Image: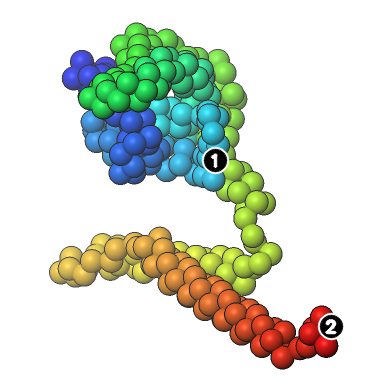
Amino acid sequence: MDISWWQILLLTLYAGYQILDELEINSSAGSAVFAGFITGLIMGDVKAGLLIGGSMQLTILGVGTFGGASRIDANSGTVLATAFSVAIGMKPEQAIAAIAVPVASLMIQTDILARFANTYFSHRIDKNIEDFNYSAINRNFLLGNIPWALSRQIPVFLALAFGGGLVTKVVNYLNTDLKWLGDGLSVAGAVLPAVVFAILLRYLPVKKHFPYLILGFTLTAILSTIFTNIQSLGTGLQGVAKSFSGTFNSLPMLAIALIGFGLAAISYKNSINQNRGGSGEQQDRSQNDNNDAEGEIEDDEL
């Protein structure tokens, strides 16, 4: 399956939009998992897109930028990995390690280039502010989006339009002469999100909320086992009794997410109550100190 021209066009347009959404719009359409969903929808395999996008989302979980710092572009990596995975039949796990992560790392350079190019419009806006030229401020602000969009669109377009043959040769080589390396990349792609999640736990206040960690792990294990067994039971009954029309949906993650939301709400409410109680006690203490101070007789009053 080749990548059609209209697929290249749509993915190129989305590649430019996703960085603008991440910087300004903030509708979550610029996240890796959403990039996987959109790319999978365009390429005709949403499952592969969500698998790659979700894995890349976990890979960059907890990664943020401070000031002018650049980070890996997981969205562009997800777009290219999903597109080539679906187009040439590449394993999603292999695409994550062989395409998504390297591309996301290389895109740091184009991100820096976009930041440098955008300073031109920033200086023009500074001059417009001094001149009180408000229409020019808005115009240069909008023009500043062009370097950001092109920093993603140009690499994605070139890769999709001219990189398909190279990727196909590399994948064929990985699955034949270098099968051991291809299998290793598949394992690395599957393990990478778990490794990054473990690193994230290292920086989270796990010791403070250790009971929630144990409870979450236990509930995940229990609900996953229960829902999986129920679904297997329903599938078996449908195979034996053709008249059986019951539907067994596997929804362990939804149940776990709702439980996690409930526990987070309880923890947040408790912290708010503690802060209010602490501030009230501090205010009372300060009031008592003031009352004591008013009743004291200073030396100069004697």
Q: Which residue is disc 2 drawn over?
A: 299
Which amino acid does the dot numbered 1 rest on?
Val
Residue 202 image point, x, y percent: 67, 51
Q: In which quarter of the image is residue 244?
A: bottom left
Instruction: Identify the residue shown where x is 22% and y is 25%.
Output: 135
**Quick check: 61 above or below 116?**
below
Q: Which residue is disc 1 drawn over?
A: 63
Residue 163 image point, x, y percent: 38, 11
On the rendered image, what quadrant is the N terminus found in? Answer: top left
Q: Please identify the residue farthest to the bottom as the structure is shown.
A: 295
Neighbours of disc 2 within 10 Å: few (<14), some (14-19), many (20+): few
Side of 196 where 241 appears, left or right: left
Which of these two is toward me, 169 or 302? 302
**Quick check: 179 above or below 39?**
above
Residue 234 image point, x, y percent: 30, 67
Instruction: Identify the residue shown where x is 22% and y is 19%.
Output: 9
Tell me if residue 36 can be seen: no
Which of these two is toward me, 17 or 56? 17
* Mark-to-mark CA distance, 2 and 1: 60 Å
Q: Which mark is residue 171?
A: none
Q: Is mark 2 on a helix, strand or loop?
A: helix
Q: Quadrant of residue 255?
A: bottom left
On the rendered image, what quadrant is the C terminus found in? Answer: bottom right
Q: Do the residues labelled 2 and 1 touch (CB within 8 Å)?
A: no
Which amino acid does the dot numbered 2 rest on?
Asp
**Quick check: 139 above or below 21?**
above
Neighbours of disc 1 within 10 Å: few (<14), some (14-19), many (20+): few
Instruction: Identify the residue shown where x is 57% and y is 81%.
Output: 280
